[in-house]
Image: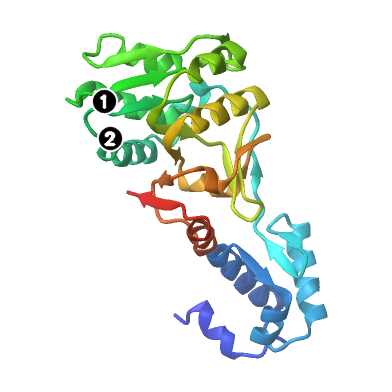
Amino acid sequence: MTSARSHYNIPGDIMFVEERQSLILEELHEKGKVRVKELSERFQVSEDLIRKDLTALEEKGQLKKAYGGAVMVKENVHRKIAAQRKHVHTAEKQRIAEKAMSMIQDGDIIFLDISTVNIELAKLLNNGTKKITIVTNMLDVMNLLVKSDMSVIFIGGELDYGRDGFIGSLAMEMVKNFRFDKAFMGVVGVDVHENAVMTYMANDGMMKKAIIKRSRNSYMMCEEEKFTQLGNYTYAELEDFTGVITNQQPAKDVCKAFAEHDLQLYYA
């Protein structure tokens, strides 16, 4: 069967419109963005024709037109409590947690914030033998570690929107008294083109920002799909983190953005 890529040698005006648009989407998913000028040269058609293709694809909800080209459509993730998310993509979260576990050393003081991936990491820590101190503001994590031999410190304050853990001014005041070796942070969405790391709510974002400020090394913990999702509040930029831990290698444009911001990529 002939690969779709072989059509790149065929002038775009000879192709069916659907074929050309399919190839445009294929390149978009591979690179994260496409440019009108480059597509025009590749398919040997006018830039106006490419713009019409992009408009048609945007009307179908398959991309978003941007200056000079188009980018992928990002899902706007609505607020969900951890109880609704903890059983979603469990295998991916476990792989991320295993990678994070390998980065923790005896003697570390680590922070586990409100994140369903951190539930999986807490399970591994609970069954392990690492001699560390864990600080957390997430109720599920605390409940898992309540009988642990490790030193566990719980941050109190105001219950968050989903009643998953504590945030607010009192919690942030407590965090200011610590210095963490590593912080493992939850992420709702990451927009590498806008240099934005997002969560659901502003008060959760402010708490995350305070944790990052008190951490020598901060790591995003997120499934690969989070790079095509949006949250409601930007709490950090890429360069605020030491690295990102995900379940598989992201798209080329995402990897490029991480490298440009000196962000170390770890994936299972």
- Label 2 belongs to which residue? 104
Q: Residues within 10 Å of mark 2 (few under 14, many from 20)?
A: some
Q: Residue at x 58, y 70 (%)?
A: 27
Q: Is residue 226 above or below residue 157?
A: below
Residue 152 image offset from top left, x and y in percent: 32, 14
Q: Position of residue 214 (x, y in %)?
A: 48, 29
For label 1, the crowd category at 10 Å Cα-Cα, with few meaning under 14, some 14 to 19 and many 20 or more, is many
Marks 1 and 2 sit apart, C-alpha to C-alpha, by 10 Å
Quadrant in which residue 126 is drawn? top left
Q: Which residue is mark 1?
A: 125
Relative to 245, 213 lies left or right:
right
Q: Residue at x 53, y 66 (%)?
A: 30
The answer to which of marks 1 and 2 sits earlier in the sequence is 2
Q: Nearer the viewer, residue 24 or 221?
A: 221
Is 188 drawn above or below residue 1 in the view shown? above
Amino acid type, mark 1? Leu
- Residue 102 is left or right of residue 228, and the answer is left
Residue 105, horizontal then vertical, whole percent:
24, 34
- Name the residue at 65% across, 32% down: 78
Residue 140: percent from the left, percent from the top?
41, 16
Q: Kindly indicate the quadrant of the structure image that contains residue 50.
A: bottom right
Helix or strand or loop: what does disc 1 sit on?
helix
Instruction: Give the SS element for disc 2.
Output: loop
